[in-house]
Amino acid sequence: MPDKLSILIVEPDKTRAEAIIDSLAETGDHHIRVLSGSTGLARSVAELNPDLVLLDMANPSRDAIDALTLASSPLERPVAMFVDRSDDSLTKAAIEAGVSAYVVDGMQPDRIKPILDAAIARFHMFSRMRSELEATKRALEERKIIDRAKGILMRARNMSEDEAYALIRKTAMSQGKKIADVSQALVTASELLT
């Protein structure tokens, strides 16, 4: 996160929006924009590309959460949602959409700083977990391709598994490519020939 945050506040009440801006001013020099409602939220988030989003909604709606999900904004930046009442289904939907902080009892200007800190920390934690999960999935897919390529070589050239892997590795090194890329090319070529 940059030192000077770009913050999008969604607050229909102008007085409350000004109180939130004043409270945020005490936490640092931020670039703040205010939307007066959640209509067109996905488009606004996409256009403004804020570092974080604060949603203050007296009555949270499924439409607002769906708009956030469509914009993929909770997965790309911390989103803190402040609501006045608890609703189990909307709370679950907000968390599944990736909202970093779902705070019941509305937005209190004096509580913004610790909630923002927690939302940012939680977003980074989940972002790391998503990255690790993606890396693990990618590694498993590459492993499967390499195993298939080894199997093709073992059958076609009567090689052991170690010899097949050594040949793929040597080819990858000589071509300056990844072992998985060479394996994928071999699997694709084999599929074309059969």
Image (cartoon, helix red, strand yellow):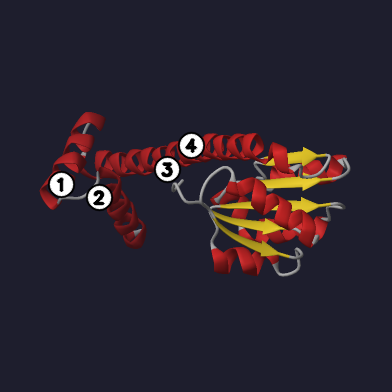
Q: Which label sits on residue 171?
A: 1
Q: Amino acid at mark 3?
A: Arg
Q: Which label's residue is closer to the chain start, 4 or 2? A: 4
Q: Which label's residue is closer to the chain start, 2 or 1? A: 1
> Mark 3 to mark 4: distance in Å?
15 Å
Q: Amino acid at mark 4?
A: Arg
- The reply to whether callout 1 and callout 4 are in contact (CB within 8 Å) is no
As rendered, which of 121 and 154 lies closer to the eye?
121
Q: Single out the mark in the foreground, 4 or 2.
A: 4
As rendered, which of 15 and 183 lies closer to the eye?
15
**Residue 65 in sight here:** no
**Residue 162 in sight here:** yes
Q: Which quadrant: the C terminus?
A: bottom left
Q: Amino acid at mark 1?
A: Thr
- The reply to whether callout 3 and callout 2 are in contact (CB within 8 Å) is no
- The reply to whether callout 2 and callout 1 are in contact (CB within 8 Å) is yes
Q: Which label sits on residue 182?
A: 2
